[in-house]
Amino acid sequence: MSTWAANINNFDTQALVLNTKPNTSLSGGKILSKEEAQEAAQDFEAFFMTKMMESMFEGISTDGMFGGGHAEKIYRSLLLNEYGKAMAKTGTIGVSDDIMSAILKMQEANSTPANDRIEVKL
């Protein structure tokens, strides 16, 4: 397992995918613009697709003269990460649309004063 995915229970998706500092926008920091929310959602979709493909490729063995080893594990991890980014960029899966919508709804609910809040169901 790579170091950037070591603690999957407590992570900020954008920070995990982009290797940046955690984003505090949904916990009281700045409000994300629609473009920033879309980018965060696309990054989450890329992470999701990468993890899905990692489990798909887990059972594939690479025997033979030029297969296997530690270097191949690293290369496969990087390759699957790029595959995930490419799949997310095309938008064919559609996870990012739902995530972006949820981010914007959460921000809208958090920006409304407590006594005027309406319950938003996702």
Image: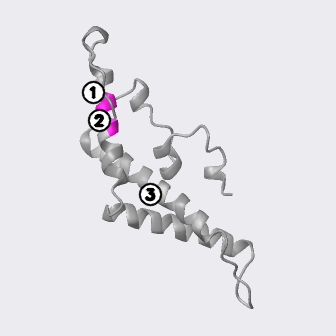
Q: Quadrant of the N terminus?
A: bottom right
Percent from the top left, x then y, of residue 95?
37, 52
- Tell me: 38 left or right of 70: left
State whether the magenta stretch is mostly helix, strand or loop: helix
Q: Which residue is mark 1?
A: 108
Percent from the top left, x then y, of residue 97?
30, 49
Q: Residue at x 34, y 62 (%)?
A: 89
Q: Which residue is mark 2?
A: 104
On screen, residue 82 above or below 41 = below
Nearest the viewer among 87 and 75 is 87
Q: Which residue is mark 3?
A: 46
Q: Residue at x 46, y 69 (%)?
A: 83
* Residue ranking furthest to the top: 115
Amino acid type, mark 2: Leu
The local crowd at label 1, few if under 14, some if 14 to 19, many if 20 or more residues have their Cα within 10 Å, is some
Percent from the top left, x then y, of residue 24?
44, 31
On screen, residue 43 above or below 111 = below
Q: Earlier along the polypeptide chain: callout 3 or callout 2?
A: 3
What separation in Å lies between label 3 and label 1 (alpha carbons)? 25 Å
Q: Secondary structure at mark 1?
A: helix
Query: Mark 2 and 1 residues: CB-CB less than 8 Å, in contact?
Result: yes
Nearest the viewer among 82 and 20 is 82
- Tell me: 23 left or right of 37: right
Amino acid type, mark 3: Ala
